[in-house]
Image (tube, helix red, strand yellow):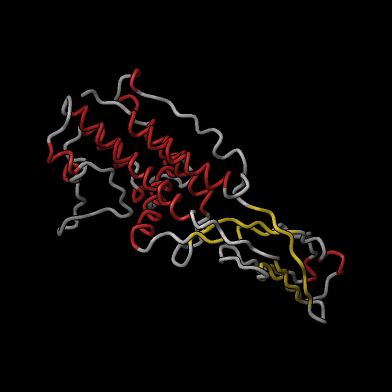
Amino acid sequence: MKANLDDPVARVERAALHYRTLKYDLHSGVDHRRRPVTVEGDDEGLEYRFYVGEIEPLDPVWPVVLGEALYDLRAALDHLIYQLHVRRFHGSPPARVAKDCAFPIRTRERRDKKGVAIPTSSWKQIKRLKRQDRDRIERLQPYMGRGDRNPAMAPIGQLRQVLSDLRRLSVIEKRRGLDPVPILAASVAPPPFPRRFGYNSHPAVGIPLVSNACVDRWTFTTAPPTEKIDRHPSVYSGVGIGPGGDGVDVLPALGACIIGVAVIIDRFIDRFPPSVAPEVDLSWIRESR
């Protein structure tokens, strides 16, 4: 048996197909839908509330397809670790080794009773790999991004965030199941108000969205010209995770996870012969917001 990346890449492609179903078949091909709002103001003109119209329920297939996409991404990483073991053992690894194979995702550094960091040579999932591979895997761990080791927006920081998001969503799915719901993703930027009006905005971003919900509230210390109030034409709705989902915006997060997992696999291509390192085109995933 020769080590290759066929299985990891196939899993990423499968996750991309699920993403395509969610975004293009069930969500009009965009991450966020634009929705018009109506306005109600108080008698003094110091507070205005903005309401959406009807919010249609999500197709009941959402949690199933989303869960399958997350499973495929997690499996892609585990298959990568298995193939690294195939390479390490020059063929199929022993059964006890194959049983332990998995891509570790750690949000905190683990230490022994004396407070010493546990080295990757003791991590059950990868301890049999060569140090070069173990070091690469450790460098990707979310806990490595804490402090000032690497800026969060650096490429390695973004990959760590992908792994953190994938772990969090997978834990939610495993413990209580996913509950995708419409959420307010963003409010359209208001017109500029001079400071003397004491303007403040209170959008309900990340909160589950229902029909006729109040999605934004503007308050003032001095009443502004009414014609400026009508310049709040719409808001953007997305799909989030229900209670306990911490306002996850599903489609952008899933798209980022798919691309991120593909990049992580690509970081190990030099460990495999070029002839067995298939490529996958994911350029279309983020083309429409």
Residue at x 77%, y 70% (from the top left corner):
39
Q: Quadrant of the N terminus?
A: top left
Q: Quadrant of the C terminus?
A: top right
Residue at the image position 69 percent from the left and 54 percent from the top: 34
> Residue 273: x percent and y percent?
31, 19
Res. 267 image quadrant: top left
Vertical placement of residue 7 versus 229, above or below: above
Q: How many marks?
A: 0
- Residue in front for this viewpoint, 85 or 228: 85
**In this rendering, is residue 164 above or below 103?**
below
- Taking the spot 60% from the left edge, 38% from the top edge, the residue there is 287
Q: Quadrant of residue 278?
A: top left
Q: Position of residue 145 (x, y in %)?
A: 38, 48
Residue projecting furthest to the front: 60
Q: Is residue 175 left or right of residue 202?
A: left
Q: Nearer the viewer, residue 19 or 5?
A: 19
Residue 20, position as x, y percentages in the image: 53, 41
Is 3 displayed left or right of 228 in the figure?
left
User: For this rendering, which residue is in front, 80 or 111?
Assistant: 80
Residue 231: % across, % down: 81, 60
Query: Relative to 270, is 31 on the left or the right?
Result: right
Q: Is residue 32 above or below residue 5?
A: below
